[in-house]
Image (cartoon, helix red, strand yellow):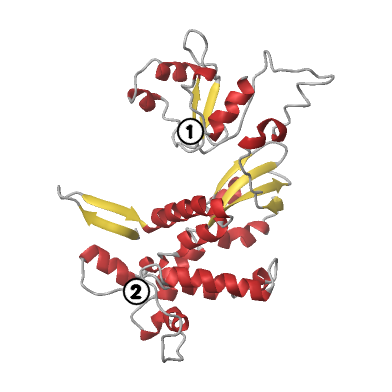
Amino acid sequence: MIFAHLEFNNNGNVLEQTLESHLIATGNMAGNIGQHVGMEAFMKLAGYLHDLGKADRLFQDYIRNKTKQQVNHSSAGGRILDDLICADQELTNLKHSKAKFAYFQELLTYILLAHHGLYDLIPYGSTEYKTYQRLRYDEDGDYHYAEDVIPPFMGAWIEILLNIRKISGSLDRIQEKLNILAVELFDKYAIIIIPENLVNILAEYEEIEFIEKPKRISFEVNQERLVSCINPVQSGVYNLFGEGVYAGIIDSGIDYSHPDFRNEDGTTRIAVLWDQTIAGNPPQGYDIGTVNIREQINEALAAPMPQRMDIVPSSNSGGHGTYVWCLKNN
């Protein structure tokens, strides 16, 4: 296991965080902040790359054995960006001019290299470009960039979601051979979670006809009725308001204790709640999430907090899903 943080508290207990969870959490947090200024993808990438150098065995020895050796772990992310991402000419020419992409590379590389301390690109009185020097940090022979940092970046940490249309049979053979997660849907469609470096191999299987990355979905609470296509259904010739109809909504979660989702006697109006962020009891035919039915939700509602969350631990910290559900119920 590769660690980002490993400490002992006052009680002698070990406090640990894997490098994978640290990078994902940092990237997601940075992306959430960046979306307010139109830089979500940029900030997310910075978070994902910033501490990749901690995968080096030098840093793992340092963190496990508390050695006094100074280990450079901030340069590997910039090196990854330079070697593997910006070196991809198809990528750099896809939507950006070379000049614009160079600015992107320069700014993000500096953020990664300097996230433990700023430095002058060209120190006063010198002609040496410090960024280039830092990108070649492993040339002294002590570091293991190619052996320790590249493999996890190219494999387990970079997983992508794919929309698949299969032409025949099941995906059992592919799941077993590639050790991936595949959820088969209706009409010969499926969703697959797979390391990025296996996508080309996946495409060679005869069961696979078409592969597509999922499209970005965004919240639209300021135009909720319009983007949900409610207005035309509730007016004109249709005049439909959903009485006696079960509504299914895919969103960020739900506060199932909200008054809008409860009957006059306090019981729930929700028939089924499938929380895909909680492992344990997925619906039949699926491998992710936990399903809670009406009886379980009612049991949770009858219990005080925090015991309620032990019965049905679903929540909606962002509030968007609850807000949308309230609209559908009113």
Quadrant where the C terminus is found in the figure: top right
- State the residue in front, 25 or 213: 25
Decide if residue 177 is in sight here. no
Are the residues tagged 2 and 1 within 8 Å (C-beta)?
no
Under tag 1, what secondary structure? loop
Under tag 2, what secondary structure? loop
User: Residue 222 appears at what percent x and percent y?
Assistant: 63, 36
On the image, numbered disc 1 is attached to which residue? 316
Q: Which amino acid does label 1 sit on?
A: Asn
User: Residue 177 appears at what percent x and percent y?
Assistant: 55, 54
On the image, numbered disc 2 is attached to which residue? 72
- Whichever of labels 2 and 1 marks the residue nearer the N terminus, that label is 2
Quadrant where the N terminus is found in the figure: bottom left
Quadrant assignment, res 98 = bottom right
Decide if residue 272 is in sight here. yes
Q: What residue type is labelled 2?
A: Asn
Q: In the displayed orientation, state which residue is furthest to the left.
A: 11
User: Residue 232 appears at what percent x and percent y?
Assistant: 78, 26
Crowd band around label 2 with a 10 angstrom C-alpha radius: few (<14), some (14–19), many (20+): some
